[in-house]
C-alpha cells in the first residue's frame, strides 16, 4: 500500500483532533477510560478518512493513466502521441 501524501496525512490529523475535541466537549467525560475510548475512536476515524482519501487518489491516478473519462473529440497535446 502506498504511503499517504502530506495533504492526506494532514487531513487525517485534523479529523482526529477535531473529532477528539468535539467528542470530549459533548460527552463531558472525565474518567481516564472514557477519554481513552473517545480518543481511540477519533484515531480510528482519522485513519479511515486517510485510507479513503488514498483510495480515491489512486482511482483518479488510474483513470488519468488509462484515459478513462476523456472525450473522444477532445484536443490532445502534440506530445501525447496518436493512438
Image (cartoon, grey):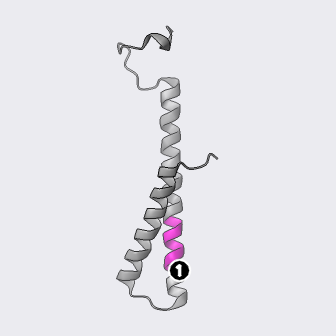
Q: Residue 23: where, in percent of width, then height?
A: 40, 77
- Label 1 environment density (alpha carbons within 10 Å; few <14, some 14–19, many ≥20): few
36 left or right of 77? right
User: SS class of the residue under badge 1?
Assistant: helix
Q: Position of residue 15 (x, y in %)?
A: 43, 64
* Main SS of residues in magenta: helix
- Residue furthest to the front: 6
Q: Which residue is mark 1?
A: 37
Q: Residue at x 52, y 27 (%)?
A: 65
Say if the magenta span includes residue 67: no
| Residue stretch in magenta | 37-45
In depth, the one of 54 and 7 nearer the eye is 7
Residue positioned most to the right: 1
Most extreme residue toward the top is: 82
Residue drawn at point x = 41 percent, y = 26 percent:
69
As drawn, 51 above or below 64: below
At x 47% / y 23%, what residue is drawn?
A: 67
Query: To which quarter of the image does residue 24 belong?
Result: bottom left
The vertical placement of 38 against 57, above or below, is below
- The percent position of residue 83, horizontal first and vertical second, equals 51, 9
Q: Name above or below for residue 23 compared with residue 72.
A: below
- Residue 21, by quadrant, is bottom left
The x and y percentages for residue 27 are 39, 84
Q: Is residue 24 above or below residue 46?
A: below
Q: Residue furthest bottom?
A: 31
The mark tally for this picture is 1
Residue pictured at 54% horizontal, 81% vertical: 36
Amino acid at each position: 500500500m502506498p504511503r499517504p501524501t502530506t495533504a492526506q496525512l494532514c487531513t487525517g490529523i485534523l479529523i482526529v483532533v477535531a473529532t477528539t475535541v468535539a467528542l470530549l466537549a459533548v460527552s463531558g467525560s472525565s474518567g481516564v477510560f472514557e477519554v481513552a475510548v473517545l480518543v481511540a475512536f477519533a484515531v480510528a476515524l482519522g485513519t479511515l478518512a486517510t485510507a479513503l482519501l488514498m483510495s480515491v487518489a489512486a482511482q483518479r491516478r488510474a483513470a488519468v493513466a488509462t484515459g478513462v473519462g476523456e472525450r473522444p473529440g477532445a484536443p490532445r497535446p502534440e506530445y501525447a502521441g496518436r493512438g
